[in-house]
Amino acid sequence: MELSSVNKNQKVTVEDAFWSNYKQLVAEQVIPYQWKALNDQLPDTAPSHAIENFRIVAGEAAGDYYGTVFQDSDVAKWLETVAYSLRSFPDPELEEAADEVISLMGRAQAEDGYLNTYYMLVEPDHRWTNLRDNHELYCAGHLIEAAVAYYETTGKYVFLDIMEEYVDLIRRTFGKEAGKLQGYPGHPEIELALLRLFDATGKREHLELAAYFIEQRGQEPHYFDMEKERRHSLDAPPTWNDQNTNFGLGYAYMQAHLPVRQQEEAVGHSVRAMYLYAAMAYLARKTDDAELQAVCDVLWDDVTNRKMYITAGLGSAVNGEAFTDAYDLPNDSMYCETCASVGLVFWAKQMLLLSPDRKYSDVLERAIYNGTISGMDLDGKRFFYVNPLEVNAYQAGRKDQEHVKQGRQKWFACACCPPNLARLIASIENHAYTQTEDTLYTHLYIAGSIQTKIGEVPVKITQNHQYPWYAGITVTVEGEGEFKLAFRIPGWCEGAAASINGKAVGISDLEKGYLVLERMWAKDDQIALSFPMPVMRIYSNPKIGMNQGQVALQRGPVVYCLEEVDNGNRLAGLRLPRESEITAAFEEDVLNGVVILEADGLRAEESEVLYQSHLPAMESVKLRAIPYYAWCNRKAGEMRIWIYET
């Protein structure tokens, strides 16, 4: 399947068994399934009404608005997913359906360019009166991103023209100039979208508007305070809930507690944070802003070294879907929204474009193999909003953990996660490579090829392997001339080896975790990379109280878990002895083909005594672990990543 990359000079193909399966699943199952959801054609699920809202605005249907204030964004993400999928799987009927949705948006658009079905139907006289809560600019951002993706894939301008007209209205409305609103969105997203629009069109006013929204955030006097005062002078409908909108977190909830250049700690709603930080990194690159880049690095360090789960999940509190204190990472009451890990992937890519460094790409890889795809089952028809690290028999009876589900759901009333994950999978190749003037960097090992130019030299490299299950990677180089190829040596890997045309290459002198190979390349030169994948026992920082005395299992980039279907219930009673050998074997008939881990373990025998003065008796058992992303695809039940070690 031939694909266009974000870099217009690149052409990427994906021939990877793991990711081709996922991309095909999105094309054949997820996109049609989500189309049915958007059109209220799924039985026994919360209705979406998202397409119908546009029809009502266009005067082509009767009825009232239904859904969250950001319902438009679900349609936008579906269109963006379609755009990426069409690169791999051309489908005239699907493209025609997308064209019709875009045409419907054009018919619904107001004469001045405005396009938001909630405000057009529910509060037509109250545009831009609640930027803090009501997601107008967030929805605009997702529509812009979809328009850019659709233009890049199809070459069609219709959607792009619709959104540029909307952006012109936004530019006339917001800014520091007299007579303009000096506001910014409560939920970041448009910042990232405007920068993508700048890349697509070359129009600097899009970059300048993105910079305005980023730099205005958190400035004093606080815009949201002034907005609230003005809103209270209006005939305010009940959607304006000024009492509990920030979940007690104040403006930290939306990263508006300080100007962005003064922020040193990740706070508040984790998805909003990821979108904002990604946009900050994007802007830093486009404006060569070293100060802003340094801020991004400080925030990156805080997130990934103090507030990120082993799965690359983010958000340790259900209240506000938010970050909490450093090292506060509970496994059974966490949030870890799928969208947060997706946003982390976007941020990691922007950081890699700023400065190729393994500390970014290792997290990128951890997120795509663990914290993102766990949000969808293996047939693409059920989804997790929350991605727990532990599911036990007690959660169903606990009000504070009712957000943790033992099974994926068909759809959600707040359905941001399924289409967000779909657009990531459909465009996974966009995150595999970046390049500088003289170097092509390989960040992800996805079988297939990339064609590009390094300097003036046409280059093609082809990856061949069975990653993430097997260690051997072969890279064939097509291109004659002198240039640099850089390959990430994963941080989880010990004992990596490399060779060119059978001759060993030393890897002791890495550049920020990358093996950089510079030579006069000849056609069909072959690079071999070996990344041994023994099963690793992972231990938490002692500051993470819940995980003490426990161990997690990881092989390559994949984190493992125990499921009740393999190990029986009461998983907390299982023990993994330190001396137990852990074996790994690929099982083709299990979970679409995965490597399974097994080890001799122990189970504490149950008793009717609540407390006792001696250790419980132990019985020998065989422990069986599966990749975390694939849990809950056979039978609902308990699950845990962290296992007590003896």
Image (tube, rainbow, N blue to C red):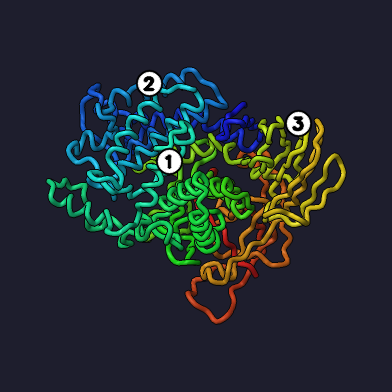
Q: CA distance from mark 1 to mark 2?
A: 30 Å
Q: Nearer the viewer, residue 464 or 105?
A: 105
Please report the residue visible at 35 percent of the width from the left and 53 percent of the height from the top. Answer: 217
Q: Name the residue at the right extreme.
A: 503
Which is more foreground, mark 3 or mark 2?
Answer: 3
Q: Which residue is mark 2?
A: 100
Give SS at disc 2: helix
User: Which quadrant of the rendered structure holds the C terminus?
Assistant: bottom right
- Report the number of numbered marks: 3
Give SS at disc 1: helix
Say whether residue 146 is visible.
yes
Residue 574 screen position, x and y as percent: 59, 63
User: Which residue type carries mark 3?
Assistant: Gly
Question: Does the residue at mark 3 contact the one at mark 1 (Cβ under 8 Å)?
Answer: no
Q: CA distance from mark 3 to mark 2?
A: 43 Å
> Of label 3 and label 2, which has the lower sequence position?
2
Residue 244 screen position, x and y as percent: 26, 57
Numbered circle sitting on residue 56: none
User: Which residue type carries mark 2?
Assistant: Glu
Q: CA distance from mark 3 to mark 1?
A: 35 Å
Residue 592 screen position, x and y as percent: 62, 38
The crowding category of the residue bearing disc 3, from other C-alpha atoms within 10 Å (few below 14, some 14 to 19, many at least 20), is: many
Q: Nearer the viewer, residue 100 or 217?
A: 217
> Of label 1 and label 2, which has the lower sequence position?
2
Q: Which residue is mark 3?
A: 479
Q: Name the residue at the bottom extreme.
A: 613
Please report the residue visible at 17 percent of the width from the left and 38 percent of the height from the top. Answer: 125
Q: Is residue 121 left or right of residue 317?
A: left
Q: Which residue is mark 1?
A: 207
Give SS at disc 3: loop
